[in-house]
Amino acid sequence: MSRDRLFPIWAAAAALLAVLASAPFVEAGFNDDWGYAHIALNLAKTGHFYYGNLSVPTLLFQAYWGSALIHLFGFSFQLLRFSTLPFAMGCGVLCYRIARMAGLPAPSALFASVALVTSPLFTPLAASFMTDVYGCFFTLLAIYLGALAGRESLTARKICLWLTASTVAGYVGGLDRQLVYIASGSVLLWAIWNWRREGTILITAVGLLAALCGGALLVLQWQAQQPDAMGMKIYTVSTWRKAAIFPGQAILTLALLILPAIAGFGKARTTLRLYAISSASVAGGFTLYWRLGHHLLFPWMTNLILPVGILPPGIEMRGSRPVVLGQEASILITVVVLAALVHLGAMLLGSFRMRVGDFLQAPAAVQLIGLFGAAYFVTLVFISRDEVFDRYLLPLLPIALIAILLLNRTPALSNWIVLAIFALYGVATTHDYFSELQARVTAFQNLRAIGIEERHISGGVELDGWTQAKLKGKMFLPPKDAIPGPNEYWLARLTPAIDPHYMLSWSVEPGTALASLPAVSFVTWLPPFRREVKILVPEN
């Protein structure tokens, strides 16, 4: 079997193995996906689509995909979780194909695809029913189909068919996660420019772009008119200061995520002068970023890659969560990322002289990932006025990996070593989150076994959200200025169906005491290796 047939299978297998190794065999939601699960379940039961303040993504594709599986196999969180796996594996295959079409040799394309699907950003999302992996898959699919249209010696009819397929892929993906529309839009704008003198292709591309924009607007308008479709978006505070900080956040976070590709980057000749220029640029940009009001040390963006693991402290459950990566680790990661940016900048200054004409002569895949990457980044800058998470960078990760490898060409042993470290960390942190989640489920079930109603148990974000959705069918959104109670869990205002007599926590909170029931212990792969979920009651 040729490498171009074998390597995509390896990439898909890497995605599968990373998820299975993290052991996400827990009958509970992950992060926000309990809300998406409830929408799919409600659709399967009633045939009606209802947001219930549980989703900001459009979620149409995913809800119907999940609903179909529920009809066939019955409802379970694990069913919906593993329904993401084909799309996660597809991301590995598509990343490989795009990398090869961009001009990477087979070993480098394999490296890019494996680095993507084993990234600490990718693995927890691949082990969930979140929308991010679906969005990444359809983004890569739209770009790949568009790149197929750019192959040489194709007839106008075949070019139009590939452009149509790319548009359909992007539109279907946009029905789930709105930002996917950017992928097909980028392909069609590229096609309009590339075939501006070819009447049939030009007319087709313009028509497809008009249809894409019109269809997207209709769906967005439909969503806006649905009852309870806003989700927690109403609580975000919009400021341009966030947008000013975002480029620094994104560059630092992406630099960390692509360290496996940067690690062996250094074969091009450079000089002390170029290092000095690069160092001054990085130091100046980092200082400006700090002066704009953001903290210096890792992490620069929140959600999945944090010193405590997955999700910020106090989000998933009450109490003081153990720290996995302490202050020393944050300092070390920050220094390594800044050094990598300096080194990468010097290498680029010494070897990169691409002009506009060179870009237009590059393979179609290179042009498309460049155009999409720029359009997506600008869009993120705009929406960062409200809020963005590190997982929003996922579609940029394969593009950044391919771009670095196009300059570095063949990964060295050091690249593979760093990739292995990142993959092991991603699997471990995902495993540890699901171990904690299983301990919370066990503690919840122990309380239910002695007759405690589920509405009297607060078990953290996934369990509380699911209880609220089950009992009321929707999340409650109080006024923005509603004042939280003393020591109130952040989700309590959104889940009034829960009147907690028992609370799961990392530690004893003010106004609470340990219940008579024992804590639930569990083992993690990252320190501290033994942890426990405590059961608290209000202090009399």
Image (cartoon, rainbow, N blue to C red):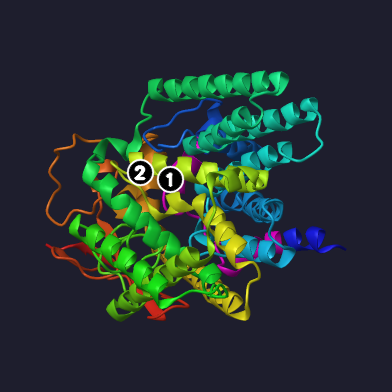
Q: Which residue is mark 2?
A: 381
What residue do we see at 44% from left, 64% from top? 255
Count of numbered marks: 2
What residue do we see at 69% from left, 28% from top? 164
Q: Nearer the viewer, residue 86 or 447?
A: 86
Quick check: is 36 in the magenta stretch? yes
What is the magenta range? 10-39
Q: Is residue 12 above or below residue 426?
A: above
Q: Nearer the viewer, residue 264 or 476?
A: 264
Give x and y (percent) for residue 527.
40, 80
Q: Which residue is mark 1?
A: 377
Disc 1: CA contacts within 10 A as few (<14), some (14-19) or many (>=20)? some
Q: Is residue 398 visible?
A: yes
Q: Is residue 98 left or right of residue 530?
A: right
Q: Are marks 1 and 2 in contact (CB under 8 Å)?
A: yes
Mark identifier at residue 315? none
Quick check: is 388 in the magenta stretch? no
Q: Is residue 69 above or below residue 245?
A: above
What residue do we see at 28% from left, 77% from top? 327
Q: Secondary structure at mark 2?
A: helix
What residue do we see at 80% from left, 34% from top? 154
